[in-house]
Amino acid sequence: MTDLDVAVVGGGISGLATAHWVSRQGRSVSVFEAADRVGGRMATRRHDGYLIDEGAETLAVHGYPATWRLLDELGVGGEEILPVRSSVGMWRKGRAHPRVGHPLGGVTGAGLTLRGRMEMSRMTSRLLRRAGSYDVDHPESTPLGTTTVAEFAADYSAEMFQYLLQPAVGTAFGWQPERSCMGPFVASMVSTRGIWKWRTYRDGMDTLARRAAATLDVRTSRPVAEVTAVPGGARLVFEDGAVLTARQVVLAVPAPLAARMHPGAPADEREYLRACGYAPMARVTCLLDRPLEPARRGLAPPVYALLLPEVEDQVLGGLTIEHNKAANRAPSGAGLVSLLPAAGTAGELLTASDETVAKTLLDRAEAYLPGVRAACTSWFVHRFPCGAVEASPQALRARPEFARRPTRTVEYAGDWLYLRASSEGAVRSAQWAAERVSSHAPGGVSTARAATSTDQP
């Protein structure tokens, strides 16, 4: 006998999606979240008429099948999902160059010189010739293998690295090009068809998490310290000393946390758990008394995200113009902007005071948004020690053994399962976790892999 049927540890979107799909199998599921609210990196703060997305920003029309399936099952759609009509821009020569990742970017340049545009076209053509070989479900099996972003860039001019590849991975994911692999990044871009026709949630990026949690048994402020597989199930020890048992457990937390919670993980799991690292991320959200935008040329469209190449700024890595992402993010006549540190400084800022982080980034932002310090009425600092999972060479090499492991009493969910730093990666992992829970015989170890329509490697 156990206290619970299925326990999911972690109330982020991967844990909630796992619980949703496991419960649809007819199982009883309880979710335990350490924080006082659900959502994880898809959390939204509401303050004086502002909607502040603390982590994830958008979702894609293409390449997000698991997310759209979950949205459909939870009845989220229609006017609850808004198109993001502005684009992503690159900062160069004192202004924003829009349409990065957009089909028109190859024509307008998106900040690249004519020579750079031609080189980007050749690079893109080279990658697209084997587009079918880039599968987000098999990140270790791309034609680029364990080639890092920096190694891939060595075949091209400095401009390709400085004004395309480095800011693309550095601002979006906080990745260091020298230790993050190019193949999974290309797979993600191929899957989503670039960065355009993206969407956001009208009522904040936590919409999906809140909707899922409303249908589940979710217990917040319940941090779990350790999970141990025992005969007939698993034992959960909470940080307050309480103990519960469950027939099956899913650890829906970042890999470093999962490794600490489950020290008795089998050998074919441990190497991958150790290899999955995360880029630390932080952001300062500034509430403005008026809307501001980066400088751009005449008729150029506005941007909602601005990439700042490291060659231009080694402290501030980018910013998002939230009131350009969705008009309801700020009250009428006001503005909302988020500032993101450069990949090389994010870790250092994580340990600094909120005042230091805000002042450091606001001082730098003045060069791109003149008047932002005077317009800022208040700010919030958001910290993510486990910000974006890194697709490192070590993780790619360790993943095949982890993916082949038999189903067990203790399973996992999270973006790290696919080395895909996105909310879709987290939701997709929940499908895999739910399939493995379903195929596992409670109380024993099944040697059969979960064979489903969403087959894993």
Image (spheres, rainbow, N blue to C red):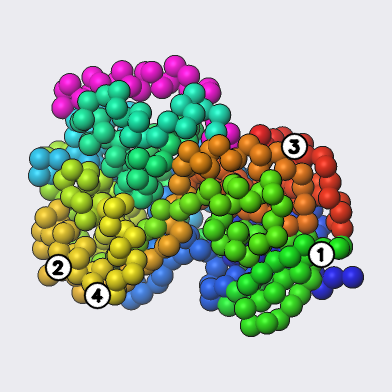
Residue under the point 26% across and 68% down: 357
Total residue callouts: 4
Distance in Å between CA atoms under marks 2 and 3? 53 Å
Q: What is the distance, in whole Å, between disc 1 and disc 2 at their CAs?
A: 56 Å
Residue with the mark numbered 2: 373
SS for tag 3? loop
Residue 355's x, y, as percent? 24, 75
| Residue placed most toward the observer, 11 or 294 | 11
Any mark on residue 452, and which? 3
Please identify, in this view, whether the residue under mark 1 or under mark 2 is nearer the observer: 1
The magenta stretch spans residue 234: no
What residue is disc 4 on? 355
How far is mark 1 from mark 4, CA to CA? 47 Å
Can you give x and y, in whole percent of width and height, for residue 233 in the image? Answer: 82, 63
Amino acid type indicated by mark 4: Glu
Residue type beneath disc 1:
Val
- From the viewer's perspective, is residue 101 above or below residue 339? above
> Which of the two marks, 3 or 4, is nearer to us in this view?
4
Question: What's the residue type where badge 3 is placed?
Answer: Thr
